[in-house]
Image: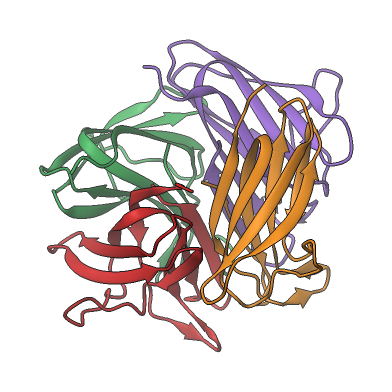
Chain colours: A red, B orange, C purple, D green
Amino acid sequence: MEIGKKVWVIADGYMNHTQKGNFESHEAVCVLNVSGKAAQIEITVYFEDQDPISGFRAVCENNRTNHIRLDKITNDIGEKIPYEKPYALLIKSDVPIVVQHSRMDVSQPEMTLMTTIAY
Amino acid sequence: MEIGKKVWVIADGYMNHTQKGNFESHEAVCVLNVSGKAAQIEITVYFEDQDPISGFRAVCENNRTNHIRLDKITNDIGEKIPYEKPYALLIKSDVPIVVQHSRMDVSQPEMTLMTTIAY
Amino acid sequence: MEIGKKVWVIADGYMNHTQKGNFESHEAVCVLNVSGKAAQIEITVYFEDQDPISGFRAVCENNRTNHIRLDKITNDIGEKIPYEKPYALLIKSDVPIVVQHSRMDVSQPEMTLMTTIAY
Amino acid sequence: MEIGKKVWVIADGYMNHTQKGNFESHEAVCVLNVSGKAAQIEITVYFEDQDPISGFRAVCENNRTNHIRLDKITNDIGEKIPYEKPYALLIKSDVPIVVQHSRMDVSQPEMTLMTTIAY
């Protein structure tokens, strides 16, 4: 099946740095790959006041989902996505995938969620 | 009317296993069918670390909505979608439908909601 | 300008019946009309277990937004959208409009919000 | 790269006027620009009961994101987007951009979030 596309954008990225019990504020880029072969995914992170950081890589095997935790990935030179700083993401895959973006925020006593299919 | 399409994807599926009073954490695949005939819907569930599970079926009659509770459906061999495990969904219908995906989470004292039109 | 389209679908409708201080659980169909003339909007409400109810009408003037409260509209014969019952919406306009759907829920002590551009 | 488009619509705008500690209710128009040149963005705000207000301007440099805070921007003649009043947004750029819209609401003790890719 050919479902999805190879380039996806998320414009509202932001992670605060809070943990509550088992819950940790984070964002995730959730991928589905039913293309027939493994997806090589590269993520570039854009900021308001500095050059983009590239080289964040992930693989989503065929017939698998990968919920990529944005607070955990590191790029080719060991950098992470910074907390408390607005960012946006450009996600490229070598095969068609579908991307949904979600945020869980526990900066206040109760958690809140938001999600959208990426563009 | 021909509204919608026959293949839909949700990439961010996750159900925690919490109940609070009358509220239970769950996700729903909400379908509208105005195609003129009943929609035979088949859902395949994809995971990060195992083969997909297929054979989840639902019907949405013509001129009806069906808010399919993902914590309740079982597939042809009695399997359910597991809790506490990231998943993604591929939803196929034999007639055009529209699909929206929502999560209600009550894992913390207060509920939170998220929703998006599927891809 | 010609922005938007004439037919929109929302598949996940549900209003619980709770009020907290100044806050009342509700959903809204938010419309923007920049078509050059007033938009005559008709909404049909679909259910899981009964025939649809039509005849809900609203106007969105040119160069105006209309945040149509779904807990408040009545149709041609005085019917309202029922509470505590899953529904879906088909929204038709005689000119192109853009539709976004949001829910505010105060069934628990704290409010939660969800939104999506309609299909 | 040519990613995105030049005209975007958000139909559900609403800011209440609440502040809690470091949190302030607000909405943001989050932009990503990878077009190759700076994006000149103009926002027009539409209301239910008055003429639109235009002349809100922002720049998003190439290879940058701009999370435009709607509670902070002022237009050419010093006007702000009013609180406690439903609005919608028409966003125009001279180069293709991607736009996502989010609301953070702290009108009740706990924060809630909502987001969607704009239309």
* Quarter the N terminus of chain B occupies: top right
- Residue B68 drawn at (x, y percent): 75, 53
User: Residue at point 72% right, 65% down?
Assistant: C108
- Residue B32 drawn at (x, y percent): 70, 37
Query: Which residue is nearer to you in this view: C52 or D42?
Result: C52
Is residue D49 in view? yes
Query: Which residue is nearer to you in this view: C98 or A65?
Result: A65
Query: Which residue is nearer to you in this view: A84 or C95?
Result: C95
Furthest toward the bottom, the residue is A21
B4 vs D30: above or below: above
Furthest toward the right, the residue is C50
User: Residue at point 55% right, 67% down?
Assistant: A112
D91 vs B7: above or below: above
- Residue D20 drawn at (x, y percent): 47, 68
- Residue C54 drawn at (x, y percent): 78, 23
Q: Quadrant of residue A28?
A: bottom left
B73 vs B80: above or below: above
Left or right, B112 with reference to C107: left
Furthest toward the front, the residue is A36
Is residue C20 in view? no
